[in-house]
């Protein structure tokens, strides 16, 4: 298969993911792009000549993000009709997309420069589920260190209200309540107090900048009305009272944070969601080694935890896994979750355990 053929096929693959995720409009756009992309625009040529692995590089989602941004800006009524889900014949959809790529080539081309920078606050439901398991083991007070924070929406985990299968956590007067469709047994019903949150990202998104916030919104599928509303609410929360979000390398940062003094009676927790696959083998190994070394130093007074919500490519599912030190129990699979946190399925003990090793490669049907 030539590069052009493989790159076209990636849009069909993404269409299948979108359809499975309940995003028919975005699926339709991806399907139409399979044939709509041509060499009459610099954007089309760059897509067809893409030298990387198009699915792993989220090539389709880069272009769809740019098209969604044009729709949100209202610059092309025919495109907005497509994104609004209006009844438009399939051949006409392809013609609209071809015309947009030619007329707005300069605006679309930069969207191919980097992978989608997205952030979904509802993923914190899975992360909070994991932290409740740690709180049940080590006590309520938790210090959060997040890698791959993007815009820092999940750094608001201490300010969200959660209802996780009837287990409630977080401030009662929170501006945002995270209430996923819960399946299976609930997490431990124990007190939890998140005393601080800090995060890092190689290219953090400052949502206090209207242009950055709009770009973030463009990466959220047009079908996801609830996600769009939640994004707007969480952006408002950060603008009112920001988060501690650094720019830097995840491995460098976590090594430095783990070397800092830790307050007695507080569990230090590394947290991340849909980022592990993007770090590369060297960074992943460094983070694993740093956590193992810090875990060997952990005590009952100063415990260490690791909570992740990451895709398992082999089993085509998103998993919440937890590990705590002191102790030699490997990672425990405590819950499964929807990629965007729409549902969480708690698991009952005995939990599946294993030393956590990254799966075969990037897999993210949600597009980050």
Image (spheres, rainbow, N blue to C red):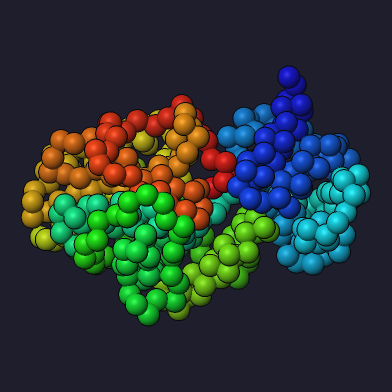
> Which residue lies at the image location 49% right of the left edge and 48% below the top edge?
338
Tag count: 0
Residue found farthest to the front: 184
- Where 123 sits versus 174, above or below? above
Q: Position of residue 61 (x, y in %)?
A: 65, 46
Query: Does 344 sit left or right of 301 as displayed?
Result: right
> Which residue lies at the image location 86% right of the left edge and 56% below the top edge?
87
- Where 46 sits versus 73, above or below? above
Question: Is any atom of residue 41 visible in this view?
Answer: yes
> Which residue lies at the image location 41% right of the left edge and 44% below the top edge?
336
Q: Position of residue 311 (x, y in %)?
A: 46, 39
Q: Position of residue 344 (x, y in %)?
A: 42, 51
Viewer-side residue, 253 vs 331: 331
Snapshot quadrant of residue 13: top right
Viewer-side residue, 339 vs 54: 339
Query: Does 117 sit left or right of 335 as displayed?
Result: right
Snapshot quadrant of residue 218: bottom right
């Amino acid at each position: 298969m030539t590069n052009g053929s493989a790159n076209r096929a990636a849009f069909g693959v993404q269409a299948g993911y979108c359809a499975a995720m309940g995003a028919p409009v975005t699926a339709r756009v991806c399907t139409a792009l399979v044939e709509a992309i041509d060499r009459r625009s610099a954007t089309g040529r760059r897509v067809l000549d893409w030298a990387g692995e198009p699915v792993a590089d989220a090539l389709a989602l880069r272009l769809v993000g740019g098209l969604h941004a044009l729709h949100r800006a209202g610059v092309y009524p025919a495109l907005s009709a497509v994104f609004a889900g209006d009844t438009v014949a399939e051949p006409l959809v392809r013609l609209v997309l071809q015309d947009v790529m030619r007329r707005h080539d300069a605006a679309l081309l930069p969207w191919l420069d980097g992978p989608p920078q997205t952030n979904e606050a509802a993923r914190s439901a899975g992360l909070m589920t994991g932290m409740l398991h740690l709180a049940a083991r080590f006590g309520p007070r938790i210090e959060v260190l997040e890698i791959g924070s993007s815009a820092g929406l999940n750094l608001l985990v201490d300010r969200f209200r959660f209802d996780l299968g009837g287990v409630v956590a977080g401030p009662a007067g929170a501006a945002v309540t995270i209430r996923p469709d819960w399946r299976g047994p609930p997490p431990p019903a124990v007190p939890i107090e998140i005393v601080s949150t800090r995060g890092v990202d190689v290219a953090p998104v400052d949502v206090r900048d209207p242009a950055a916030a709009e770009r973030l919104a463009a990466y959220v599928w047009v079908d996801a009305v609830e996600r769009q509303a939640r994004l707007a609410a969480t952006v408002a929360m950060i603008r009112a009272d920001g988060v501690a979000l650094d720019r830097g390398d995840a491995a460098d940062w976590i090594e430095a944070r783990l070397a800092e003094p830790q307050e007695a009676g507080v569990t230090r927790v590394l947290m991340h969601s849909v980022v592990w696959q993007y770090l590369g083998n060297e960074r992943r190994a460094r983070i694993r080694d740093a956590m193992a070394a810090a875990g060997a130093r952990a005590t009952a007074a100063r415990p260490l935890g690791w909570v992740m919500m990451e895709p398992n490519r082999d089993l085509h599912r998103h998993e919440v896994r937890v590990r705590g030190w002191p102790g030699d129990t490997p990672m425990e699979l405590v819950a499964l979750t929807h990629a965007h946190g729409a549902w969480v399925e708690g698991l009952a003990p005995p939990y599946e355990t294993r030393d956590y090793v990254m799966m075969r490669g990037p897999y993210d049907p949600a597009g980050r």
